[in-house]
Amino acid sequence: MSEGISASFARKYTDGPEIRVEGLRGFAQSGITVLFGASGAGKSTLVRCLAGLERPDEGTIQFGGETWFDSARRLFVRPQERRIGYVPQEYALFPHLSVERNIGYGLREMARAERQGRVKETVSWLGLEGLERRLPRELSGGQQQRVSLARAIVRQPRLLLLDEPLSALDLPTRARLRSQLRQWLIERAIPSVVVTHDRTEALALGDSLAVMDGGRVVQQGSAPEVFGRPTSLAVAGILNVETVQPGRVLAMADGLATVAVGPRKLIAVAPDLPADAGEVYVCIRAEDVILIKGDAAHSSPRNCLPAVVRSLRPEGPMMRIDLDCGFPLAALLTKQACTELALASNDAVMALVKAPQIHLIPRAEV
């Protein structure tokens, strides 16, 4: 893990919360790690401690084989010596400086020709040509976001920290810049940590994911792994898994569990489920539910559930469909798919869920 972050520390506040990070694992050398959780979970404090903007009360922080903080040794490396790039929530651009002067602010000790070349390259890379002489108040939210990112990257940091970089933008701009942000970060091959409480952003941006709750990191892993297999009921709630229902294990064989949920029986891939597990929570993400009308005889999923549509609600470009299949089940389809199926309330449908898409959490461990 010498190329990434290794951190275990506590940050205490008088008459306030305690942020305690235990065993935060190293990030991929050029990957994007998302810190995910609700507002107040401690994500921004964690990032500010990594940046050196706040000093923990105890513990250690290491990066790239260097120790940035060690309370036992009374060691604290200042932010400017860590060679990190930091993009705060509010962008914090200097209002009296032009775009190019904002970007080049951290390069003042560099020779003028080299500084101008570095700024020009970064302006071109982020598509800011023609805006160089404008002041921040003359820019759109998306343009300000790119200038803030440019100012952080132009110094060629070893680690880039972005605290809710898209939260101040309107929804259309946020959706447009989401994929661009990931592309920009991958192109630069800078290990990055992105703070967000938005599930869509976490899935779109992250290679790895650290879920925070109550000032603690409660689960870490690849983004698909964490979203697909939460380790506890609390994490499933933080990740907003749409269907979480109590179930009872009826049988286990060859890594497959047969589970009763209400009047229905489901088959789930559960190789890690304890042999003595009896009561479980059954977790199904809405995007993993397929809906069809008519016969499901030629469908591959093991779980084919007769269901009735109870409601349809738009969620951005998608439609959320609430189903009754003997227990409440949510599905998420594109609006085009809903139109093609001619879905309406009280329609009879078949809900198909593949066995690997059903995740079981032992209730005894919750």
Image (spheres, helix red, strand yellow):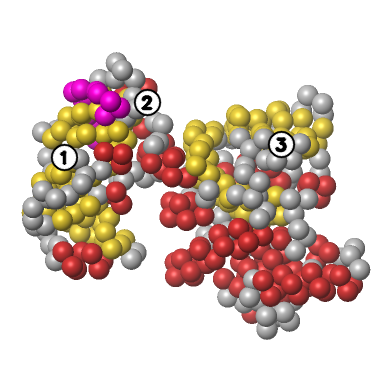
Give how far apart the Cα atoms at labels 2 and 1 are: 25 Å
Residue drawn at the location 10% of the way across and 33% of the way down: 263
Q: Position of residue 208 (x, y in %)?
A: 53, 44
Structural crowding at the residue carrying mark 2, measured as other residues with C-alpha within 10 Å and reported as few (<14), some (14–19) or many (≥20):
few
Q: Nearer the viewer, residue 85 or 354?
A: 354
Residue drawn at the location 20% of the way across and 51% of the way down: 322
The answer, for residue 214, to whether it is visible in the render is no
Q: Is residue 102 left or right of residue 326?
A: right
To which residue does mark 3 refer? Answer: 2
The answer, for residue 266, to whether it is visible in the render is yes
Residue situated furthest top in the rendering: 276
Q: Of discs 3 and 1, which sits in the foreground?
A: 3
Q: Is residue 340 magenta?
A: no
Q: Which mark is residue 327?
A: 1
**Amino acid at dot 2:** Asp
**Amino acid at dot 3:** Ser
Q: Of discs 2 and 1, which sits in the foreground?
A: 2
Q: Quadrant of the N terminus?
A: top right
Q: Position of residue 119 (x, y in %)?
A: 77, 71
To which residue does mark 2 refer? Answer: 272
Structural crowding at the residue carrying mark 1, measured as other residues with C-alpha within 10 Å and reported as few (<14), some (14–19) or many (≥20):
some
Residues drawn in magenta: 244-256
Indicate the secondary structure of the residue bearing disc 2: loop
Overall secondary structure of the magenta section: strand
Give how far apart the Cα atoms at labels 2 and 3 are: 30 Å
Q: Is residue 328 left or right of residue 200?
A: left
Q: Is residue 139 left or right of residue 62?
A: left
**Picture layout, residue 124 above or below residue 223:** below
**Picture layout, residue 107 above or below residue 39:** below
Asked whether the residues under the numbered discs 2 and 3 touch, taking CB atoms below 8 Å apart as contact, a structural biologist would say: no
Residue drawn at the location 40% of the way across and 36% of the way down: 230
